[in-house]
């Protein structure tokens, strides 16, 4: 079936994996990738598919309502997957307004433009979907009730049931929103607007909340690519606080596959949590990353351990995130394809094999920004 799909934020980390998957898997769809190309957007992420006949890039700001109106109507868009956002918690602490502008006002402009176009069509919203990609961070923070970890209660391919959980509570689709950072507050607000457009106007919307992603093409201000790059250059690894915060990690291609499944088979107005029951204390994860980088670079074990540097904690640092994604597994049959050790190995290899990609980003403006953030802590 021919379709015109708009993917926003497709030049970013997760968006580029979603664009690649859709362009390759659905030759009958035309994929429009709309991205403002902020510091986090990089067309080099899509070099391999940029010449495909079923792919078009549009440089635009989602907060530009008139532009969103014409992109959607000129291209007769019949499905939207919305990933464009400001996404880094540390930046949101420094500059919350940019997060409100893009994540809240930008999402609202996109929703409004989609609604106006779909209302103007004779068949109304038939078969159309506004799919909003969100984060587990909107649910707030969980307690560490098992500081030493206990066997994970549920088994998936990501954890093989042997992994540890650091508490007895998990985020469910019904968990009350309780965001703490300006980033998560802006994402929570955008989630509410998306649901409001369904409840008020009958727009066919859907929201998913995913755990921390890792993998190729992630901007190197986030923990895993930052640390791989710093280890390669013998630079300090800034561990916030005591390194005891817990995050639940999912390989980015598994997230993209989940988005594909949900976009096609998910129920309108539903929420699905996406995760792999794969919790790691930051310091344990960092040790796995160091070990993997050292091994792949041919360094002896322990070679880079001295780079670990404990620094002032992030303001309002959420202690633990842990997603319960059994609804998605039960109802739509999705589960992660990779175990964490395989995913980390693939990821480290990718960054070491694609040093040009990393060097192009980390030279110039970004390096100055990062040095500034680091010195100010
Ligand atoms: P990213 O920062 O790597 O990419 C964001 C993209 O959005 C960039 O290409 C950027 O240029 C674009 N963008 C920013 N502002 C824009 C605007 N005003 N108009 C148009 N484009 C704009 O982010 P990511 O990690 O790929 O995250 C993508 C989405 O997934 C976000 O909505 C994020 O909240 C969500 N999410 C991320 C994670 C994660 O671990 N990275 C986990 C769960 C959910
Ligand atoms: P991050 O990749 O920024 O994702 P998020 O804050 O959205 O979970 O950070 C992951 C974890 O790593 C988080 O607990 C903060 C911590 N962290 C550090 O300890 N040092 C760093 O330099 C960064 C970027 C993150």
Image (cartoon, rainbow, N blue to C red):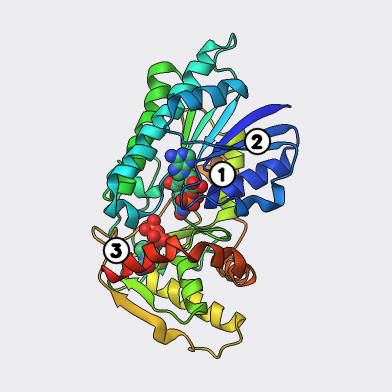
CB at mark 1 closer than 8 A to ligand 1? yes
Q: Quadrant of residue 175?
A: top left
Residue visible at 32% across and 36% down in the picture: 189
Within 10 angstroms of label 1, few (less than 14), some, or many (20 or more) residues?
many
Check the image and name the residue furthest to the bottom.
300
Identify the residue under disc 1: 10
Q: Which numbered tag is attached to residue 250? A: none
Whichever of callouts 2 and 3 sits on the residue coming sooner in the sequence is 2
Side (left or right) of 277 relative to 295: left
Whichever of callouts 2 and 1 sits on the residue coming sooner in the sequence is 1
At mark 1, the secondary structure is loop
Question: Marks 1/3: CA distance?
Answer: 35 Å
363, above or below 7, in the image: below
Identify the residue under disc 2: 31
215, above or below 47, in the image: below
Nearer to us of marks 1 and 3 is 1
Q: Which numbered tag is attached to residue 144? A: 3
Q: Nearer the viewer, residue 210 or 316?
A: 316
Q: Looking at the picture, how far across and down is residue 78, in whole percent?
A: 60, 24
Given contact means CB atoms under 8 Å apart, are the residues at marks 2 and 1 in contact?
yes
Q: Is residue 208 visible?
A: no
Q: Looking at the picture, how far across and down is residue 157, in whole percent?
A: 58, 60
Nearer to us of marks 2 and 3 is 2
């Amino acid at each position: 079936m021919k379709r015109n799909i708009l993917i926003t934020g497709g030049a970013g980390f997760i968006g580029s994996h979603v664009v690649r998957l859709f362009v390759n898997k659905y030759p009958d769809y035309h994929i429009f990738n709309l991205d403002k190309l902020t510091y986090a957007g990089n067309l080099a992420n899509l070099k391999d598919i940029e010449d495909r006949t079923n792919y078009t890039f549009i440089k635009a700001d989602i907060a530009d309502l008139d532009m969103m109106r014409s992109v959607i109507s000129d291209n007769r868009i019949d499905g939207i997957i919305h990933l464009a956002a400001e996404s880094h918690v540390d930046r949101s602490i420094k500059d919350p307004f940019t997060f409100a502008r893009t994540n809240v006002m930008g999402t609202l402009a996109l929703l409004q433009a989609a609604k106006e176009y779909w209302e103007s069509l004779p068949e109304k919203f038939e078969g159309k979907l506004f799919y909003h990609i969100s984060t587990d961070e909107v649910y707030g923070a969980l307690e560490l009730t098992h500081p030493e970890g206990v066997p994970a209660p549920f088994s998936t391919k990501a954890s093989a049931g042997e992994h540890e959980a650091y508490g007895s509570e998990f985020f469910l689709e019904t968990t009350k929103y309780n965001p703490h950072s300006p980033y998560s507050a802006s994402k929570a607000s955008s989630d509410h607007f998306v649901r409001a457009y369904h409840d008020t106007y009958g727009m066919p919307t859907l929201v998913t909340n995913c755990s921390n992603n890792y993998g190729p093409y992630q901007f190197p201000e986030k923990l895993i690519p930052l640390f791989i790059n710093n280890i390669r250059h013998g630079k300090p690894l800034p561990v916030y606080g005591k390194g005891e915060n817990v995050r639940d990690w999912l390989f980015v291609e598994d997230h993209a596959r989940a988005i594909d499944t949900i976009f096609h088979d998910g129920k309108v107005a539903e929420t699905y949590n996406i995760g792999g029951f794969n919790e790691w204390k930051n310091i344990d994860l960092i040790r796995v990353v160091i070990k993997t980088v050292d091994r792949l670079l041919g360094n002896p074990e322990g070679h880079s351990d001295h780079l670990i540097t404990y620094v002032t904690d992030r303001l309002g640092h959420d202690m633990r995130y842990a997603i319960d994604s059994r609804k998605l597994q039960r109802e739509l049959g999705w589960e992660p394809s990779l175990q964490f050790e395989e995913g980390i190995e693939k990821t480290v290899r990718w960054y070491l094999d694609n040093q040009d990609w990393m060097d192009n980003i980390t030279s110039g403006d970004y390096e100055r920004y990062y040095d500034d953030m680091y010195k100010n802590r």
